[in-house]
Image (spheres, helix red, strand yellow):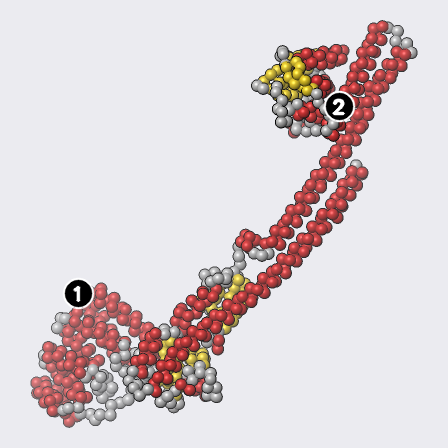
């Protein structure tokens, strides 16, 4: 056992030295290769993401420069003599570039003009008062009749005479509003409607002394008259038309004025809807009203945002404009202003493009359009060919735009040119699925090498252990074989020597006893001869030196001869060999080899017959095969050992079988003889009930075998 353990350790040491150590070294190199490749990949990825971020920032800058250049060219054209189309052309240009929220002029006096802006209203007290004297001389007589004497007919006549006498449009508008008011009091509704329509058409922009446009007041009255005349559809059409004109900025109004008129219009429309007095398409009117209301809320937010910019941005913009004068080549400067809760992206277009106006032009950039129309498409375009996730974050750190899957490790975070827009762009490398990484990444080759080396180590170690185990087992079986064969040789040789010496010394007086001794000498000689033949023939077969001489013969007499020989040899031990042999059994075989194989089977059956003394030998033809079967009724073989009994030197693990004399070569020899005859050998056995060994030989040998 110590020798086996020492041998096992020596073989394992050689395996580790010759295979394990080099494999571990290669595995380490593969691991270092993975690390180096990972570092290189990270470097390449960082370089790629930096290039992408620079391209995006540069593209945004170029897009904004194109927009700014368009306005610069348009403003420069105001030097032409005809400037009547200047503001409309700027309005059209603004419409063509949705990224521009508004165009403004920063005056040297410190004010900010919004020449193309359509505001709902201006700040309170921002409109100039009328310079026209109050037309009291034309209105006094009519007002006395109307308000002091309640004589509406005389008042109407007085207002009409005054209207015919004056030529000033503002005075005529004021007189006409007074005429319509008195006509309404006299319930002359059709005449009043006619008067209000004339005011709305001819004197819409004329203002009262308090600055209220006559057109707004007249259209409110028209809606009220239509409703009083049970013309709800006409009333709501008039009121919604007025609502639309208020939103479109048809009249310059202060915030308080706009809020008053807008609330009056909405209350009147809501009242009509509540009365359900609209006979035609009420749902259509309601949807239109809802749409107009939504538009008003949107424009109200825009108006207040622009007014906040107009009121608070001048000083900051002037400071930036002054710092730019010394660098005329740099014709645009972008800045970000924080005013209240609002953020303004401003582009100053530079003083060198100004013509007849004294100030600096600039653009307010629309952040929502900038995100949706410029930034998002550009990011998608530049990241489409790469597996890159991205996020655009605002100054508060919240995500403004993001890709479909922004997970992964951040590789780069950058801002835009001039910090306009004032957002940051983050690029990520998404975490790829493990299987995809192994199948597609460059590191996979190292991983596969590592797995291959690990597999080689495991396979080599397993193979080595199995080989060592097999060799040790083979060495043990050979040792057992030497011991067994030595004993097998010693026993017949001792018997032969002793009996020969007794016969030589004439110490056996009885003739019957001498005959018995002669039989024993022959039996032991045959036993010794069989053992030697088994060893020699098996050795020749292993080395390929065994020559078989096939001849056509009847196997029945041969089997009968073998059976009779054994019967004669073991009859004194009480054995009975029964034969069931069909006749004839013509087949091509090697007489000596087949005799040796059958002899081994019968010898084995006798050895392992146990208490049973009956052996059956059968021979018959089945299909195209000749079958020779030897059956005993002895100890049998365990199921797990059936596949091992044909291995050389193998002896069953049962203690009873190990006490039986034998070399462990007989069945191995039978198998090789059967295979040499293009046949097979099979075994059927059950512990305690015996075993049946069958040699199956083809009647016709194949020529290509």
Residue sitting at the far top: 511
Residue 69, position as x, y percentages in the image: 40, 79
Badge 2: residue crowd in 10 Å (few <14, some 14–19, many ≥20): many
Residue 246, position as x, y percentages in the image: 26, 77
Judge from the rendering whether residue 568 lies leftward or rightward of residue 83; answer left or right: right
| Callout 1 secondary element | loop
Judge from the rendering whether residue 582 lies leftward or rightward of residue 182; answer left or right: right
**Residue drawn 67% across the image and 56% down it:** 29
**Residue drawn 42% across the image and 84% down it:** 350
Residue indicated by mark 1: 280
Q: Quadrant of the N terminus?
A: top right
**Residue drawn 29% across the image and 82% down it:** 85
State whether residue 91 is above or below residue 389: below
Among the two numbered marks 2 and 1 on one chain, the one whose residue lies closer to the N terminus: 1
Q: Nearer the viewer, residue 13 or 219?
A: 13
**Residue drawn 15% across the image and 76% down it:** 225
Residue indicated by mark 2: 534
Dot label at residue 569? none
Q: Are marks 2 and 1 in contact (CB under 8 Å)?
A: no
Question: What is the quadrant of residue 486 in the picture?
Answer: top right
Residue 158, position as x, y percentages in the image: 10, 89
**Comparing labels 2 and 1, the label whose residue is closer to the camera:** 2
State whether residue 64 is above or below residue 639: below
User: Would residue 331 be visible to someone looking at this image?
Assistant: yes
């Amino acid at each position: 056992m110590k020798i086996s353990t020492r041998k096992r350790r020596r073989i394992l040491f050689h395996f580790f030295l010759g295979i394990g150590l080099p494999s571990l070294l290669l595995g380490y190199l593969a691991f270092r290769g993975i690390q180096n490749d990972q570092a290189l990949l990270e470097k390449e990825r960082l370089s790629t993401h930096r290039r992408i971020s620079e391209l995006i920032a540069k593209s945004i800058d170029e897009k904004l420069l194109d927009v700014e250049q368009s306005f610069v060219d348009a403003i420069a054209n105001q030097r032409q003599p005809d400037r009547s189309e200047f503001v409309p052309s700027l309005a059209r240009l603004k419409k063509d570039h949705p990224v521009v929220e508004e165009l403004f002029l920063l005056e040297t006096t410190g004010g900010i003009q919004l020449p193309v802006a359509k505001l709902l209203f201006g700040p309170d007290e921002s409109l100039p008062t009328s310079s026209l004297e109050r037309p009291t001389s034309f209105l006094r007589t009519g007002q006395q009749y109307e308000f002091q004497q309640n004589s509406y007919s005389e008042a109407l006549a007085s207002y009409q005479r005054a209207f015919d006498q004056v030529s000033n449009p503002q005075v005529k508008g004021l007189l006409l509003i007074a005429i319509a008011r008195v006509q309404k009091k006299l319930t002359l509704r059709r005449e009043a409607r006619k008067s209000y329509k004339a005011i709305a058409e001819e004197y819409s922009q004329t203002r009262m002394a308090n600055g209220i446009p006559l057109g707004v007041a007249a259209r409110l009255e028209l809606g009220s008259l239509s409703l009083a005349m049970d013309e709800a559809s006409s009333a709501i059409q008039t009121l919604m038309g007025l609502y639309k004109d208020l939103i479109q900025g048809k009249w310059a109004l202060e915030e308080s004025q706009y809020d008053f008129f807008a609330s009056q219009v909405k209350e009147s429309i809501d009242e009509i809807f509540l009365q359900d007095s609209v006979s035609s398409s009420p749902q259509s009117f309601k949807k239109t009203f809802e749409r107009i209301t939504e538009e008003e809320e949107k424009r109200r937010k825009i108006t207040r945002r622009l007014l906040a910019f107009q009121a608070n941005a001048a000083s900051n913009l002037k400071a930036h404009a002054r710092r730019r004068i010394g660098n005329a080549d740099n014709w645009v400067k972008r800045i970000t202003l924080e005013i209240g809760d609002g953020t303004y992206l401003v582009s100053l277009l530079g003083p060198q493009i100004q013509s007849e106006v004294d100030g600096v032009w600039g653009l307010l950039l629309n952040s929502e359009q900038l995100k949706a129309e410029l930034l998002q498409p550009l990011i998608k375009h530049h990241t489409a060919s790469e597996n890159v996730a991205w996020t655009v974050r605002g100054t508060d750190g919240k995500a403004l735009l993001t890709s479909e899957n922004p997970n992964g490790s951040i590789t780069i975070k950058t801002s835009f040119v001039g910090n306009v827009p004032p957002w940051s762009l983050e690029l990520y490398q998404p975490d790829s699925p493990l299987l995809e990484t192994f199948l597609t990444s460059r590191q996979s080759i190292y991983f596969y090498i590592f797995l291959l080396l690990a597999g080689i180590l495991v396979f080599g170690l397993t193979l080595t252990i199995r080989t060592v185990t097999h060799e040790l087992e083979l060495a043990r079986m050979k040792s057992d074989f030497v011991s067994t064969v030595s004993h097998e040789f010693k026993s017949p040789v001792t018997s032969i020597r002793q009996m020969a010496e007794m016969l030589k010394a004439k110490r056996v007086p009885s003739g019957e006893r001498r005959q018995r001794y002669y039989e024993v000498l022959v039996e032991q000689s045959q036993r010794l001869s069989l053992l030697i033949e088994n060893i020699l023939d098996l050795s020749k077969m292993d080395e390929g030196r065994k020559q078989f001489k096939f001849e056509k013969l009847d196997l029945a007499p041969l089997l009968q001869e073998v059976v009779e020989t054994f019967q004669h040899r073991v009859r004194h031990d009480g054995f009975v060999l029964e034969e069931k042999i069909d006749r004839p059994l013509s087949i091509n075989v090697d007489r000596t080899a087949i005799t040796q194989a059958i002899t081994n089977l019968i010898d084995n059956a006798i050895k392992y017959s146990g208490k049973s003394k009956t052996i059956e030998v059968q021979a018959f033809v089945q299909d195209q095969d000749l079958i020779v079967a030897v059956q005993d009724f002895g100890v049998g073989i365990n199921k797990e050992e059936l596949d091992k009994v044909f291995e050389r030197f193998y002896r069953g693990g049962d203690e009873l079988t190990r006490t039986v004399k034998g070399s462990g070569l007989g069945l191995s020899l039978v198998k090789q003889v059967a295979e040499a005859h293009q046949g097979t050998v099979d075994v059927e056995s059950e512990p305690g009930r015996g075993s049946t060994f069958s040699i199956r030989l083809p009647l016709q040998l194949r020529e290509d075998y």
